[in-house]
Amino acid sequence: QVQLVESGGGLVQAGGSLRLSCAASGSIFNIAAMGWYRQAPGKQRELVAAITSGDSTNYADSVKGRFTISRDNAKNTVYLQMNSLKPEDTAVYYCNALVFGLRYWGQGTQVTVSS
């Protein structure tokens, strides 16, 4: 079992920045990869960025060059630095952990970008 707690969401103007954090607890040594997903109203949940246990990263095309995923192993925390935010980035952002083929989810944090 892995527990995930997100923080850092909020309201920001277009062009601004936010940093999301995801603190993991539980069976963290079995985590193969962690990622950030988002879901906007009326849309499917989509992958934003992911990082593996070997520090490989991948990003959705829509956020490349603007968002950066990173992690602090000492704090068992994954971050999503979001710069140059756009109104279309508005969504609930969810942290995700992949453990032995199972996905665990956080409760989500709202990000709202005003134009």
Image: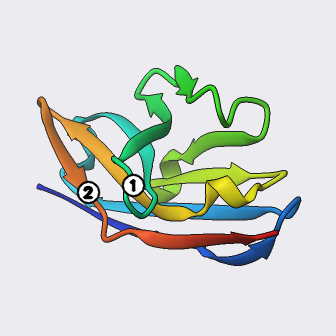
Q: CA distance from mark 2 to mark 1?
A: 6 Å
For label 2, the SS is strand
Please tell me whether residue 84 is drawn above or below residue 66 in the rendered image: below
Q: Is residue 42 left or right of residue 17?
A: left
Count of residue discs: 2
Q: Tell me what residue is drawn at x 67 percent, y 37 percent.
A: 63
Task: Please name the residue that numbered disc 2 is placed on.
Answer: 105
Q: Is residue 62 left or right of residue 4?
A: right
Q: Is residue 7 visible?
A: no
| Residue 75: mark | none
Label pair 2/1, CB-CB below 8 angstroms: yes
Residue at the spot 51% in from the left edge and 63% down from the top edge: 91
The reply, left or right, for residue 67 in relation to residue 27 is right
Is residue 10 at all visible to an observer of this figure?
A: yes
Image quarter where the N terminus lies is: bottom left
Q: Amino acid at mark 1?
A: Cys
Q: Where does residue 54 sit, x and y in percent of width and height?
A: 46, 21
Q: Can you give x and y, in whole percent of width and height, for residue 48 in the image?
A: 51, 40
Vertical side of 56 occupied by 99: above or below: below
Q: Amino acid at mark 2?
A: Trp
Element marked by disc 1: strand
Look at mark 1 in the image and give the residue it sits on. 95
Q: Bin the neighbour count of mark 1 within 10 Å (Cα to Cα): few under 14, some 14-19, many 20 and up.
A: many
Mark 2 or mark 1, which has the lower sequence index? Answer: 1
Considering only vertical position in the picture, is 29 above or below 92?
above
- Kindly indicate the quadrant of the structure image that contains residue 26: bottom left
* Quadrant of the image containing the C terminus: bottom right
Residue farthest to the bottom? 11
> Looking at the image, which is closer to me, 1 or 104?
104
Residue 65, placed above or below residue 42: above
Residue 107: percent from the left, percent from the top?
31, 71
